[in-house]
Amino acid sequence: MASVQEYMRQYEPVWIKLKKDLRVSITAHRSLHKRIIKAVTKEKWLDDGYKLEIFPKHAVMYHSRKGSVITFILQHYVDLTKVTTQDI
């Protein structure tokens, strides 16, 4: 029987750690930075369960690069357009 790890996409572990800790740094060659940023962003958009879990908030992901280190930061914001009078 195959383990869950075998079916995990390459950058999914980075996204899982980012959801948990709200900040994660990884080291990679600078030529790979653009690819990694795009892949982690894709993981965020694919995770519909996470979007439902944090509703009515929404998450915004930021990144910064310094040398070979990429730091991802996840911040939650309340989307006031989705808040009804019953939520208050």
Image: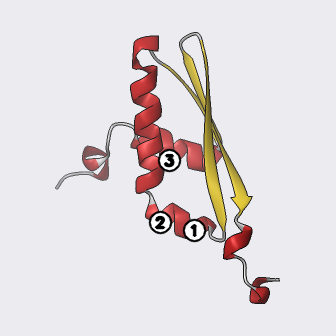
Residue 72 tag number: none
| Residue placed under numbered mark 1 in the picture | 53
Q: What is the three-letter code of the residue carrying label 3?
A: Ile
**Mark 2 — residue?**
49
- Looking at the picture, how far across and down is residue 65, in whole percent? 60, 20
Kind of element beneath mark 1: helix
Mark 2–mark 1 distance (CA, rounded to whole Å): 6 Å
Q: Residue 49, image x and y in percent?
A: 47, 66
Question: Could you tell me the amino acid type at mark 1?
Answer: Glu
Badge 2 crowding class, 10 Å Cα cut-off, few under 14, some 14 to 19, many 20 or more, is few
Of mark 3 and mark 1, the one earlier in the sequence is 3
Q: Nearer the viewer, mark 2 or mark 3?
A: 2
Task: State if disc 1 and disc 2 touch (CB < 8 Å).
Answer: yes
Q: Is residue 51 above or below residue 17?
A: below
Q: Residue at x 67, y 75 (%)?
A: 82
Mark 1 burial class by Cα count in 10 Å: few <14, some 14-19, many 20+: few
Q: Choose between 67 and 84: the one closer to the eye.
A: 84
